Amino acid sequence: AQDALGGRILDPDGKPARNIFVRIDQVGSAPGAPAGLGIYTKPDGYFFATGFKAGQTYELTAQATTADGRKLVGSVQTKVPNATMLIVLR
């Protein structure tokens, strides 16, 4: 799909990170622009979303909190389309 963003989220040990919220924001959007979108990863750590502008740059940020309260974050910028991203939480 020419309007898609997708990929996989891994935890710090390299295992699939399931049910992780991935926030998708357009880079350089004007103040007052609509808020970013989000999607949750599947049990295998994958996510896939469509409806983005081809050629536009987006920032994807995944966040999680461990059982002991530590915050983990992974972020990447990419242009649409890209369905092969890999984000590792650190």
Image (cartoon, helix red, strand yellow):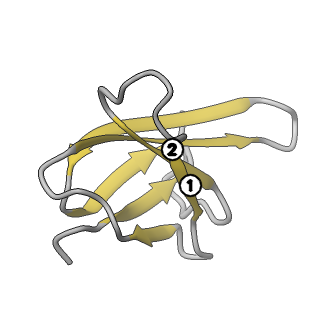
Disc marking residue 36: 2
Q: Are marks 2 and 1 in contact (CB under 8 Å)?
A: yes
The percent coordinates of residue 54 (x first, y second) are: 16, 58
The kind of residue tagged 1 is Gly
**Most distant residue in the top direction:** 31
Q: Nearer the viewer, residue 78 or 52?
A: 52
64 up-or-down from 48: above or below: above
Kindly identify the amino acid type of the residue bearing the numbered disc 2: Gly
Q: 56 above or below 90?
A: below
- Position of residue 31 relative to residue 51, above or below, is above
Instruction: Name the residue rendered at 51%, 44% in the picture.
Output: 36
Circle 1: element type: strand
Q: Left or right? Give the position of 28 relative to 72.
A: left
* Residue at (47% x, 68% y) in the render: 47
In whole angstroms, how far apart are the C-alphas of marks 2 and 1? 7 Å
Q: Which residue is mark 1?
A: 38
- Residue toward you, 44 or 14: 44
Q: Nearer the viewer, residue 21 or 53?
A: 53
